Image (tube, rainbow, N blue to C red):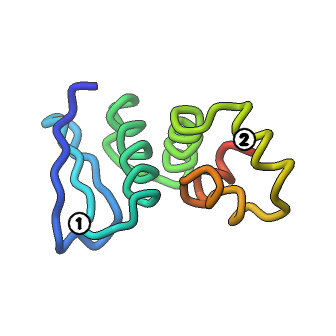
């Protein structure tokens, strides 16, 4: 998508998008599912050109990430097998934020 991705050990949040320079920085050392979910969220900020992540902008980014990461059929199968959002997230290999955004 044209953004460069870097990792930082001292990043206080999981990820950050720098508009104008098209750079995404991710916290080093996260689990794979947290890294993938965070990267998708930050890619949404890149896609929309978000300068700030206000609560509505953050929710939009999680919804975009959910659509990127979860095929509808896979979600339906996971939901049929599991009762909780956490178990669905584990099944799909994403964070719970992604599952909540998909279901919203």
Between 66 and 62, the one nearer to me in the picture: 66
Task: Kindly state the secondary structure of the residue where label 1 is placed.
Answer: loop
Residue that appears at 16% across and 51% down: 6
Residue that appears at 17% across and 71% down: 9
Residue that appears at 44% across and 60% down: 34
Residue 16, horizontal then vertical, whole percent: 29, 54
Left or right of 99, for residue 103: right
Q: Is residue 12 above or below residue 20?
A: below
CA neighbours of label 1 inside 10 A, class few (<14), some (14 to 19), many (20+): some
Q: Which mark is residue 28?
A: 1
Image quarter of the C terminus: top right
Which residue was labeled with disc 2? 75
Residue 84, horizontal then vertical, whole percent: 79, 64
Residue 4, horizontal then vertical, whole percent: 16, 38
Residue that appears at 21% across and 26% down: 2
Contact (Cβ within 8 Å) of mark 2 with mark 1 = no
Locate residue 47: give its quadrant: top left
Image quarter of the N terminus: top left
Between 51 and 71, the one nearer to me in the picture: 71
Q: Earlier in the sequence, mark 2 or mark 1?
A: 1
Task: Kindly state the secondary structure of the residue where label 2 is placed.
Answer: helix
Left or right of 13, for residue 74: right
């Amino acid at each position: 998508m044209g953004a460069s991705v870097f990792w930082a050990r001292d990043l206080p949040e999981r990820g950050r998008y720098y508009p104008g320079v098209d750079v995404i920085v991710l916290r080093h050392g996260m689990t794979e599912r947290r890294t993938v979910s965070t990267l998708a969220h930050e890619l949404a900020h890149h896609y929309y050109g978000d300068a700030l992540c206000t609560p509505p902008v953050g929710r939009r980014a999680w919804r975009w990430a959910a659509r990127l990461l979860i095929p509808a059929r896979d979600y339906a199968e996971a939901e049929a097998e599991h009762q909780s959002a956490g178990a669905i997230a584990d099944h799909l290999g994403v964070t719970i934020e992604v599952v909540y955004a998909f279901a919203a």
